[in-house]
Image (tube, rainbow, N blue to C red):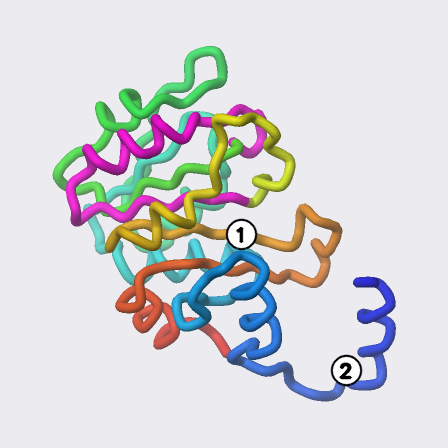
Amino acid sequence: AAMEAFAAAAARLADYPDGSAANLRAAIATQYGLEPERLTFGCGSDEVFEDLCQIFLEPGDNIVQGQYGFAAYAIFAKSCQADVLYAPMPNLRLTAEAVLATVNDRTRIVFLDNPCNPVGTIMPFDEVRRLHAALPPSVVLVLDGAYGEFADSPDYDQGFELARGANNVVVTKTFSKLGLASARVGWGYAPAEMIGALERIRQP
């Protein structure tokens, strides 16, 4: 169905897309039971990560990510002249304790790719909750669910409910791993105030 829709759009390639992603916004809100006004969209979830770094990072700040986590986080942080701190991942697993031990007073964002890209391990959601509860409110926890559809553990959760009730949690998703990598469609679910900031700086 996706390929048929892509082919059908060939006659409209001269048109700019809808910058508000109205149809996709409505479909995602319905599919996941989310508030449409709390969604943002980007050129893959990478653009959402980049925009978050631009909003929250200044020179001398830092992000924390897993030792074997997704490389793009560090690229975007360094482009903002921020430092990158790596939490150790013994046995290729990231724990809440390891992240919290790495966070310091200049940490602004914790990126958690769950499942981890590229090693494939997960952080059980009770640990994610414990991590969030122990983080300073000024630190944004980004739950990157790019590979969430492939996680079949009962201990896994995408984190939408946690994000719904928190002021510092963002859940990001992408269609790339579902077979639409070349289309570059990513999105995020975040607090309304954060969405306002993202929408002000994101590219059209």
Number of numbered discs on residues: 2
Q: Which residue is drawn at 44% across and 66% down?
A: 39
- Quarter of the figure with the N terminus: bottom right
The amino acid type found where label 2 is placed reads: Leu
Disc 2 to disc 1, C-alpha distance: 25 Å
Residue 85 appears at what percent x and percent y?
A: 30, 32
Residue 80 appears at what percent x and percent y?
A: 32, 55
- Circle 2 residue: 13
Q: Which residue is drawn at 77% across and 82% down?
A: 13
Toward the viewer: 23 or 50?
23
Q: In the shown orientation, is residue 45 left or right of residue 73?
A: right
> Magenta includes 130?
yes
The amino acid type found where label 1 is placed reads: Lys
What range is drawn magenta here?
A: 116-145
| Image position of 28 with respect to 68: above or below | below
- Circle 1 residue: 173
